Amino acid sequence: MNASNLSTPIRSPETIEQRIAASLRDFGRFHEPIQAEELATILESVVSTLFSEQTVAGVNVGITHSITNMAVYIRNAEADVCFIVRIHKPIVATIQLSYSLINDPVSISNKLVVKKGTLTIEEKTRRFDLKAKAALAAINVDYLVRQELSDLSGIIFRTLPPQLRNHGVEGILSHIELLLTNTNLEVCLEGEFWPL
């Protein structure tokens, strides 16, 4: 993974979420290429939401966690992603994940999938912490990541509108297209959004 392959077009000082919120509010559409750093911001929010939503036997387990070392590198129509999830409560554990996203070769619409054979997960708990090991087994991080990332567009449909409330808009997404190019991710979002 080499960051020198990334292009860095000049951007406004607004965050990616601010630009998305303003464009959806004003035009009902956001369509622009985003850089690896901006994709990292989006994926960090997605992963954080996934862990926050986890339940065991139908009960929300209230996982207090943080995402660190999120890094994304885009080249040759692939996005290499790696990051660490630190779980603070109800257990103490560290999960290191890495995978590659590619354009879905079988989809008619533009969407991303995890490239086969690229997902690696390393789970660490305190020595002899059997409760933490059992809890990680119950969460089944491998299944969670494979299942949820098999439909990244679906996760964005679910998680982006609540994030955009923090930027003064509310609404519903109706269409998402994601297409990796050699240097960035082309994002097309459509929906009906209005000021709060």
Image: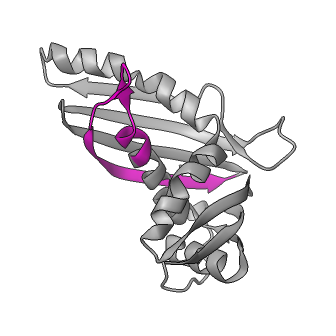
| Residue sitting nearer the eye, 19 or 169 | 169
The quadrant in which residue 126 appears is: top left
How far across and down, in percent of the image, does residue 54 sit?
A: 38, 33
Residue 82 figure quarter:
top left
Q: Inspect this view and state whether residue 110 appears.
A: yes
Inspect the magenta stretch and tell me whether residue 62 lies in it. Answer: yes
Identify which residue is drawn at 32% across, 26% down.
Answer: 123
Q: How is the model colour-coded?
A: one colour
Res. 52 image quadrant: top left
User: Which is more toward the observer, 6 or 132?
Assistant: 132
Report the side of 152 relative to 94 (left or right): right
Residue 128 lies in magenta, yes or no?
no
Q: Return the x and y of residue 152 as percentages of the image width and height.
A: 62, 44
Residue 2 appears in the rendering: no
Q: Position of residue 19 (x, y in %)?
A: 57, 78
Q: Is residue 144 above or below residue 160?
A: above
Q: Residue at x 41, y 52 (%)?
A: 70
Q: Is residue 14 left or right of residue 77?
A: left
Q: Which residues are magenta?
A: 49-75
Relative vertical location of residue 57 with respect to residue 30 in this rendering, above or below: above
Q: Residue at x 69, y 44 (%)?
A: 112
Query: Does 140 sit above or below residue 100?
Result: above
In this orientation, which residue lies closer to the viewer: 63 or 1? 63
Residue 42 drawn at (x, y percent):
51, 58
